[in-house]
Amino acid sequence: MERTFAIIKPDAVSKKLAGQILARIEAAGFTVVAMRLQHLTKAEAEGFYAVHQARPFFGALTDFMSSGPCVLLCLEAPDAIKQWRALMGATDPAKAEPGTLRKDFGASIDNNATHGSDAPETAAFELGYFFRGLELR
Ligand code: GDP
């Protein structure tokens, strides 16, 4: 078993797609270990995406991520990190495979509905950034 960190981003929550996305997550076999609705501050979004600090889209990305509530998730499954990224699809919804969440629910590369950790080290950092140990038992 493996755990990963996922976000249903503010665009999807504001379009009332969170329920549909959660249903797809559960249908794909993930267990929801922890879940919270949270409206991130700009500073919280900047800390989360610190790795992208030097990128030209950092300001727009952190404005967007702090624009409204999102759903923060710890998901568990065999090979969860890879499997969740496969279910999400490519970063740019226009390039995402049919049947993926970003294809079905993302509008553009910056409004792409979901986030997922890309490696075990990032999953550990991201889960610890948003969840307390007691929430991840
Ligand atoms: P992810 O792991 O697939 O989410 O992609 P990255 O970690 O590379 O980028 C983080 C987020 O920044 C993505 O989900 C996009 O929303 C956004 N992003 C990445 N690349 C670009 C870009 O070239 N332009 C814009 N506007 N946003 C981007």
Image: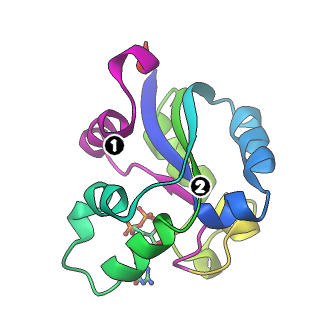
Q: Residue 117 appears at what percent x and percent y?
A: 39, 48
At 61% from the left and 27% from the top, the residue drawn is 32
Is residue 109 toward the left or the right of residue 130 in the image? right
Q: Is residue 98 above or below residue 130?
A: below
Q: Is mark 1 within 8 Å of ligand 1?
A: no
Q: Secondary structure at mark 1?
A: helix
What range is drawn magenta here? 109-135
Res. 100 visible in picture: no
Please tell me the numbered disc located at residue 126.
1
Mark 1 residue type: Glu
Residue placed most toward the observer, 44 or 99: 44
Mark 2 residue type: Pro
The answer to whether the residue labelled 1 contacts the one labelled 2, judged by CB atoms less than 8 Å apart, is no
Residue placed most toward the observer, 36 or 56: 36
At 44% from the left and 29% from the top, the residue drawn is 3
| Circle 1 residues within 10 Å: few <14, some 14–19, many ≥20 | some
Q: Is residue 34 magenta?
A: no
Q: Residue 5 appears at what percent x and percent y?
A: 44, 40
Q: Secondary structure at mark 2?
A: loop
Report which residue position mark 2 lands on: 69
Q: Is residue 111 above or below residue 9?
A: below
| Circle 2 residues within 10 Å: few <14, some 14–19, many ≥20 | many
Q: Earlier in the sequence, mark 1 or mark 2?
A: 2
